[in-house]
Image (cartoon, rainbow, N blue to C red):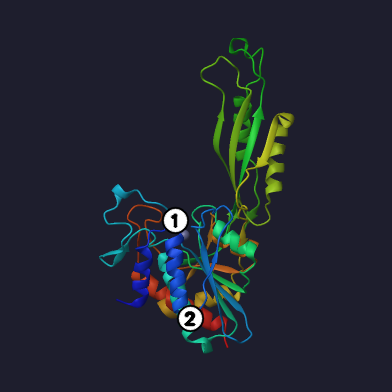
């Protein structure tokens, strides 16, 4: 078997569902040592037992130059065992597709990053500057692995490749996302006296919810625009004859560049004021254990993007489509928090986060070739 494919299989065979990243982190650290490099472990604060590390390393050519960050997540989502036709924690090839949890998202990408690192560790004369590689935990959760590396200040680079599973198109922009908690207050009273007495918070909240979803958003030529989604509401008590005096509203807001959390809160407040509810509504950004992801887009003529497009054409003979993703991922942190231009591209497959997830060996082999050429061209000696 091709050593790269074997590496991919080995990674799939290690169960690394979000929350149990230690074994795969140690496996990757072992490979890095095998390349003659030093692995560093990074732990995030909430990981009290120290079982969810990220691993990173640096390969220095010894010559001045730029730095390339190669990054990917080592955790996967969980599985519902009864729906799999193969063992999800054993890579199984059927009709040219490789099945297993992480086969698509994103152990093929990890294998390619590791082999790229191995190649340049063995050929330091083929690049100048540095290559940083980061294998992060908790991407499928709160991205605490990547945020911890940000806090440590170890990820400084000129370019980044996020080896996520999208092969026929590369994402160069993502929206951001915030969650808001809105509390709408009314006035309780005996239900039999309503509506002469009392003020129904559920009715006020319903009107406000509709008004929130009708609020304008900024637009972006490629990311299209922001969106509002009222995702959860609760209030009232079906067991007592009381007019509801409070309603909780949970609002998701996807944003494009230029839209801040403060702007969104002001928008919700103005919607409340428009309904005469200004003094009956509290709005706050939902507290979260890691920062919210903000939106970004790398210019299409940036050398990182054009180099990827060129290398893709060289390896596959095809044009690579540039994409803008409506969601968020760790690329948002790389681009916004770390300020590193990032392309999100890597071997893909089918059934992302679903049963019978699988990946394509030919895309793993091609992605490795593409990463190698990108590093060679961007870090020319
Ligand atoms: Zn992923």
Label 2 secondary element: loop
The one of 239 and 250 positioned closer to us in this rendering: 239
Q: As displayed, is residue 297 above or below residue 214?
A: below
Q: How many marks?
A: 2
Tell me how far mark 2 sits from mark 1, CA to CA: 26 Å
Q: Can you see residue 168?
A: no
Measured from the top left, where is residue 196 in percent x and y?
Answer: 66, 12
User: On screen, 252 above or below 202?
Assistant: below
Looking at the picture, how far across and down is residue 358, in whole percent? 34, 61
Q: Which residue is mark 1?
A: 20
Which badge, 2 or 1, is on the more N-terminal residue?
1
Residue 241 vs residue 194, the one in the foreground: 241
- Report the front residue among 77 and 360: 77
* Rendered-image quadrant of the C terminus: bottom right
State the image coordinates of residue 250 (x, y, percent, origin top left): 58, 38
CB at disc 2 and ligand 1 closer than 8 Å: no
Residue under the point 54% across and 73% down: 57
- Identity of the residue drawn at 62% across and 61% down: 296
Q: Residue at x 58, y 80 (%)?
A: 130
Which corner quadrant of the image does residue 147 belong to? Answer: bottom right
Horizontal relation, residue 34 to residue 250: left or right: left
Identify the image quadrant of residue 302. bottom right
Query: Can you identify the residue that label 2 sits on?
Result: 36
């Amino acid at each position: 078997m091709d050593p790269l494919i074997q590496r991919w299989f080995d990674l799939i065979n290690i169960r690394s569902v979000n929350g149990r990243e230690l074994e795969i982190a140690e496996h990757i650290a072992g490979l890095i040592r095998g390349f003659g490099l030093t692995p560093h472990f990074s732990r995030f604060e909430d990981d009290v037992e120290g079982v969810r590390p990220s691993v990173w390393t640096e390969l220095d050519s010894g010559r001045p130059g730029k730095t390339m960050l190669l990054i990917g997540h080592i955790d996967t989502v969980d599985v519902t065992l009864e729906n799999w036709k193969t063992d999800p924690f054993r890579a199984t090839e059927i009709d040219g597709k490789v099945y297993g949890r992480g086969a698509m998202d994103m152990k093929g990408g990890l294998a390619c990053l590791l082999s790229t690192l191995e190649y340049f560790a063995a050929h330091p004369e083929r690049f100048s500057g540095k290559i940083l590689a980061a294998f992060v935990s908790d991407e499928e959760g709160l991205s605490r692995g990547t945020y911890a590396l940000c806090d440590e200040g170890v990820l400084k680079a000129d370019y980044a490749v996020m080896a996520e599973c999208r092969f026929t198109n590369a994402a160069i922009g993502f929206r951001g996302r915030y969650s808001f908690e809105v509390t709408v207050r009314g006035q309780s009273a005996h239900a039999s006296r309503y509506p002469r007495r009392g003020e129904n918070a559920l009715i006020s909240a319903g009107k406000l919810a509709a008004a929130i979803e009708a609020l304008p958003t900024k637009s972006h030529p490629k990311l299209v625009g922001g969106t509002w989604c009222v995702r959860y509401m609760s209030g009232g008590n079906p067991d007592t004859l009381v007019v509801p005096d409070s309603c909780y509203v949970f609002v998701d807001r996807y944003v494009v560049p230029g839209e801040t959390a403060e702007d969104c809160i002001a928008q919700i407040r103005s919607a409340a004021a428009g309904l005469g509810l200004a003094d009956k509504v509290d709005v706050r950004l939902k507290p979260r254990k890691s920062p919210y992801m903000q939106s970004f887009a790398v210019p299409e003529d940036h050398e990182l993007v054009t180099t990827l497009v060129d290398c893709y054409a060289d390896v596959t003979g095809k044009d690579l489509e540039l994409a803008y993703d409506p969601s968020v991922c760790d690329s948002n942190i790389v681009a916004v928090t770390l300020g590193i231009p990032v392309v999100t591209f890597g071997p893909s497959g089918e059934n992302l986060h679903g049963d019978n997830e699988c990946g394509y060996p030919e895309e793993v082999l091609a992605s490795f070739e593409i990463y190698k050429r990108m590093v060679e061209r961007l870090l020319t000696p």
